[in-house]
Amino acid sequence: MAEYIITIKDEGDGISIAMAGPAASDSKAGLLAQGLIGILPKVVSKIAQSKAERCNCDECKAARNPGTTKPTLH
């Protein structure tokens, strides 16, 4: 039986993420812990982007509203 602890802390302007547990384990808990640690960078990035100010330049506005022009058929 394996036990893993994932710790997430606020640190200054960012966060720290640590995992404690057996180094190599094929247990269900080990596989789940590794999977969670693997997706954390994407989740953290998504949260940071949602809290960031939106840029209002023409290029960013266009990227947020794709398909506003009529497609040309050839």
Image (spheres, rainbow, N blue to C red):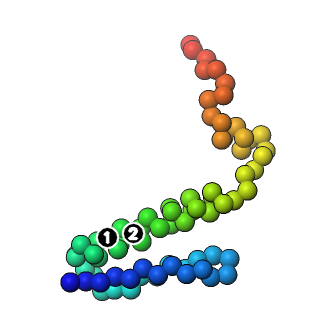
> Which quadrant would residue 49 be assigned to in this image?
bottom right
Quadrant of image for the C terminus? top right
Left or right: where 42 falls relative to 68: left
Residue 23 appears in the figure: no
Give the quadrant of the N terminus. bottom left
Residue 2 lies, with reference to residue 31, above or below; the image says below
In the picture, measured across the screen, residue 73 lies left or right of residue 39, that is right
Check whether the beta carbons of the residues at disc 2 and disc 1 lie within 8 A of each other. Answer: yes
Relative placement, left or right, of 42 versus 59 is left
Camera-nearest residue between 74 and 70: 70
Q: Residue at x 51, y 79 (%)?
A: 8
Mark 2 lies on residue = 36
- Give amino acid for label 2: Leu
Residue 2 position within the rendered picture, expressed as x and y whole percent measured from the top left: 25, 83
Q: Look at the numbered disc 2 and give the secondary structure of its residue.
A: helix
Distance in Å between CA atoms under marks 2 and 1: 6 Å
Residue 71 position within the rendered picture, expressed as x and y whole percent measured from the top left: 60, 20
Circle 1 packing at 10 Å, graded few (<14), some (14-19), many (20+), is few
Position above or below: 47 against 73: below
Q: To which residue does mark 1 refer?
A: 32
Tell me if mark 2 has few (under 14), some (14-19) or many (20+) residues whose alpha carbon lies within 10 angstroms of its own. few
Question: Farthest residue toward the top?
Answer: 74
**Position in image of residue 58 (x %, y %):** 77, 40
- At a point 29% along the width and 76% down the height, the residue shown is 30
63, 48: nearer the viewer: 48
- Which residue is at the far right? 57
Q: Which mark is residue 2?
A: none
Amino acid type, residue under disc 1 in the picture: Leu
Residue found 60% across the figure and 80% down from its top: 10
